[in-house]
Amino acid sequence: MNQAKGRKSIFITGASSGMGRATALKFASEGWFIGAFDIAQAGLDSLKDELGAENGFFMTLDVTNVEQFAEAMSAFGEATGGRLDLMFSNAGISAAAGMFDEVSWEEIMKVVNVNFFGVMIGIRAAIPLLRTTPGSLCLTNASSSAIWGTAGIGAYSATKHAVRGLTEALSIELKRYGVRAADLLPGLIDTPILPESLRAIAPTEGRWRLVPTTEIADTVWDAYHQDVLHWYVPKELREFHRQVVDNPEAVREERFELAQQMAAMAEQKS
């Protein structure tokens, strides 16, 4: 039996918590059928209880596993009758803070595998359903770290730049199927993975303020309904991007001062 008959559908990776969970709740409230995928079974179970089993498809998924992703997409397609209106590649992990040359290679590759390879694997798995669904959108979750490389989490920042670049390429390539592509460029989002060093210095207003996950969910909703490539959260980050392009040297010095401030805070705590 097709659980999602007559309903639009969204496939969300990293759906059990944070931005993914907030997005699932938002779209479910709008009547969409939710494909919730995550490596954390307990989070999926609680989301299923909250949404109701009839309103979604819930499955554990390691986004770095090609075969597992293909199976998850196939099962989701069966549940939706082959429909996929919005692919939200949201799953990601934060890197252990540290200078690039001091972080272990294993840690670097873990970040690259989840944050970039996992996105590519998911998009390739989603394209067959996206191209047969009119008006569909392939949406990736990048980061403000995709605007300017962030010292102290260099590998993480590099993966987010890669995601942004991939999305820009796909926004052209997928046009041949009538599929749109866009990305999110969130700043400091109020989730458990936000480093305490950043949380401690976050202002209460402006482009580096803490943003609730509900604002991300609302932006995903807007992204589906508008044809915009880059979505800055908060919107003031667009000005930061312009600053990066116009005067990167000044941004470099500003970021250096911030890095020193965070390092000093870390020393005080140790």
Image: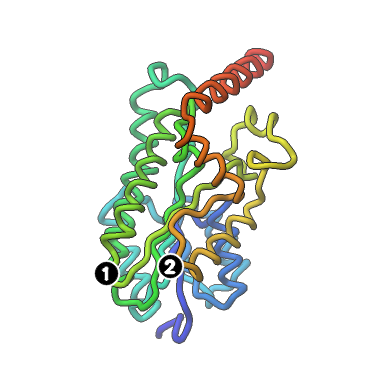
The quadrant in which residue 78 appears is bottom left
Is the N terminus in the top left, top right, bottom left or bottom right quadrant? bottom left
Amino acid beneath label 1: Pro
Q: Is residue 43 placed above or below 9 in the rendered structure?
A: above
The residue positioned 60% from the left and 70% from the top of the image is 51
Q: Position of residue 160 (x, y in %)?
A: 41, 41
Q: Is residue 80 placed above or below 220 in the rendered structure?
A: below
The quadrant in which residue 117 appears is top left
Is the C terminus in the top left, top right, bottom left or bottom right quadrant? top right
Between 129 and 65, the one nearer to me in the picture: 129
Which disc is residue 86 wearing? 2
Sequence order check, earlier mark of 2 and 1: 2
Q: Position of residue 79 (x, y in %)?
A: 39, 77
* Secondary structure state at the residue bearing disc 2: strand
Q: How many marks?
A: 2
Q: Is residue 39 placed above or below 1 in the rendered structure?
A: above
Which disc is residue 39 wearing? none
Distance between the alpha carbons at the discs numbered 2 and 1:
13 Å
The residue positioned 26% from the left and 60% from the top of the image is 173
Quickly name the residue at label 1: 128
144 left or right, relative to 72: right
* Secondary structure state at the residue bearing disc 1: helix
Amino acid beneath label 2: Leu
Between 218 and 9, the one nearer to me in the picture: 218
161 left or right, relative to 267: left
Q: Is residue 179 placed above or below 184 in the rendered structure?
A: below
Q: Position of residue 201 (x, y in %)?
A: 69, 29
Q: Position of residue 66 (x, y in %)?
A: 27, 53
